[in-house]
């Protein structure tokens, strides 16, 4: 092929040539030039959520899940009680990592094809005063459903509970304004909607709660309070940073700003999503979610009911045509997922639908209609 395969996944994503080229230079991890890149990046990330007055930005090495774990361990004291509204796989992961760190976690189940309910959360917090924090997954990429961040934040603020937001696949695309939405921590990563490469997470921590976080974490490397204090004092990362990832993200954020920031990125991803869904519908495929709760990040489709369908063959044939799809994350239904994010637009989405059509013909499947 004369181009890289297009990654139709929730991350890592297809990146621009400018972002790739940024990684061709080596950087000293304690060098003043690299420290300046880190400092500038932290400021630009704070600007995206309008959070300079209220929050600090703490970067962390590793995948996004590293930062979710670090945020929970840092913000929740050992005797804290975390409530996790659960409508998908990443909610379950948040509850699991909370429990593994010795914090009490209560899971509040919701249907996988529905957003979590702010009214139900309100009732739960009224019923259990021991809950200290709520962990919300903003966009549950197990299915693609968008959860109501603003409404959940209002409930948490009214009850005086800390809100920790996993915004991994929403940050940079869906609107998040720290001036209007109160959260104690919000977590995202380099390889998602900012269109950098994977390897760095980051956490916005509310200044008002930061000092009280000292000593909460049982981890040396993943203590966000210590990471912040050290970085403010020295301008450096405490431990070896992913230098190439950091400079690539700085370049990706520069392009994000040039494109028009979050509104422009949301508009492009929304157009990608519409192009994908409309095209797949013409092939007989059915979306798992109703349109009104579908975030324009990743779409879950029911698998074709035809006896010849097998995801591994379907995946391999689409890959041969230049597109990387994603397996389903549901346990009760057979599905697959197609991402709408990354440095791609309508042309790539149209080509992806054409590749799926070719794949169906190759497999002898007349259409993508599910067994419903």
Image (cartoon, rainbow, N blue to C red):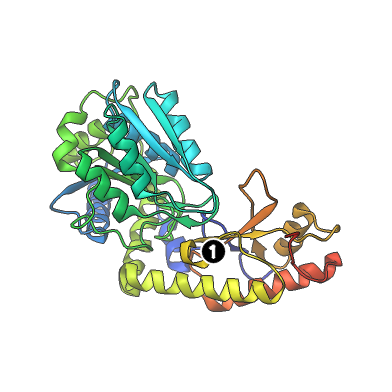
Q: Residue tagged by mark 1?
A: 290
Residue beneath the point at 81% across and 58% down: 309
Residue 351 percent coordinates (x, y): 64, 75
Other-residue count near label 1 (Cα within 10 Å), few / some / many at <14 / 14–19 / ≥20: few
Residue beneath the point at 79% across and 68% down: 360
Q: Quadrant of residue 48?
A: bottom left
Residue 84 percent coordinates (x, y): 40, 37
Residue 69 as seen in the image, left or right of residue 47: right
Number of labels in the image equals 1
Q: Nearer the viewer, residue 116 or 352?
A: 116
Image quadrant for the C terminus?
bottom right
Query: In this view of the protein, can residue 228 be seen by the observer?
Result: yes
Residue 6 percent coordinates (x, y): 60, 65
Residue 160 as seen in the image, left or right of residue 322: left
Residue 140 as seen in the image, left or right of residue 236: right
Residue 182 percent coordinates (x, y): 22, 49
Asked if residue 177 is positioned above or below residue 129 in the image, the reply reads below
Asked if residue 124 is positioned above or below residue 10 in the image, the reply reads above
Residue beneath the point at 58% across and 62% down: 8
Asked if residue 89 is positioned above or below residue 177 in the image, the reply reads above
Residue 184 as seen in the image, left or right of residue 276: left
Query: In this view of the protein, can residue 28 be seen by the observer?
Result: no
Image quadrant for the N terminus?
bottom right
Q: Quadrant of residue 257?
A: bottom left
Q: Nearer the viewer, residue 201 or 209?
A: 209
Q: Nearer the viewer, residue 276 or 359?
A: 276
């Amino acid at each position: 092929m004369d181009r890289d395969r297009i990654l139709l996944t929730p991350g890592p994503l297809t990146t621009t040539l400018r972002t790739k080229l940024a990684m061709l230079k080596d950087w000293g991890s304690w060098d003043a030039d690299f420290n300046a890149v880190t400092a500038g990046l932290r400021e630009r990330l704070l600007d995206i959520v309008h959070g300079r007055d209220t929050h600090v930005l703490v970067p962390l090495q590793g995948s996004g899940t590293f930062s979710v774990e670090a945020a929970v361990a840092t913000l929740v004291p050992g005797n804290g009680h975390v409530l996790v509204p659960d409508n998908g796989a990443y909610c379950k992961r948040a509850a699991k990592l909370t429990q593994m760190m010795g914090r009490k976690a209560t899971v509040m189940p919701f249907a996988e094809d529905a957003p979590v309910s702010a009214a139900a959360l309100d009732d739960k917090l009224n019923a259990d005063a021991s809950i200290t924090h709520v962990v919300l997954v903003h966009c549950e990429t197990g299915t693609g459903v968008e959860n109501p961040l603003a409404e959940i934040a209002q409930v948490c603020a009214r009850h005086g509970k800390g809100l920790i937001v996993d915004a991994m696949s929403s940050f940079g695309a869906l609107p998040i304004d720290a001036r209007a939405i109160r959260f104690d921590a919000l977590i995202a990563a380099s390889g998602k909607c900012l269109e950098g490469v994977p390897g760095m997470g980051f956490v916005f921590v509310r200044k008002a709660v930061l000092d009280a976080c000292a000593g909460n974490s049982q981890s040396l490397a993943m203590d966000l309070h210590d990471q912040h204090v050290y970085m403010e004092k020295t301008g450096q990362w405490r431990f070896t940073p992913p230098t190439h990832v950091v400079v690539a993200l700085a370049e990706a954020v520069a392009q994000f700003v040039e494109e028009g920031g979050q509104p422009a990125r949301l508009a492009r991803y929304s157009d990608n999503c519409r192009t994908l869904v409309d095209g797949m519908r013409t092939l007989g495929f059915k979306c798992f979610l109703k349109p009104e709760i579908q975030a324009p990040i990743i779409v879950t489709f029911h698998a074709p009911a035809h006896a010849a369908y097998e995801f591994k063959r379907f995946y391999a044939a689409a890959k041969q045509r230049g597109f990387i799809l994603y397996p389903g994350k549901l346990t009760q239904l057979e599905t697959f997922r197609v991402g709408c994010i990354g440095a791609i637009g309508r042309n790539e989405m149209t080509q992806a639908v054409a590749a799926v059509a070719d794949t169906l013909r190759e497999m002898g499947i007349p259409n993508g209609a599910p067994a419903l």
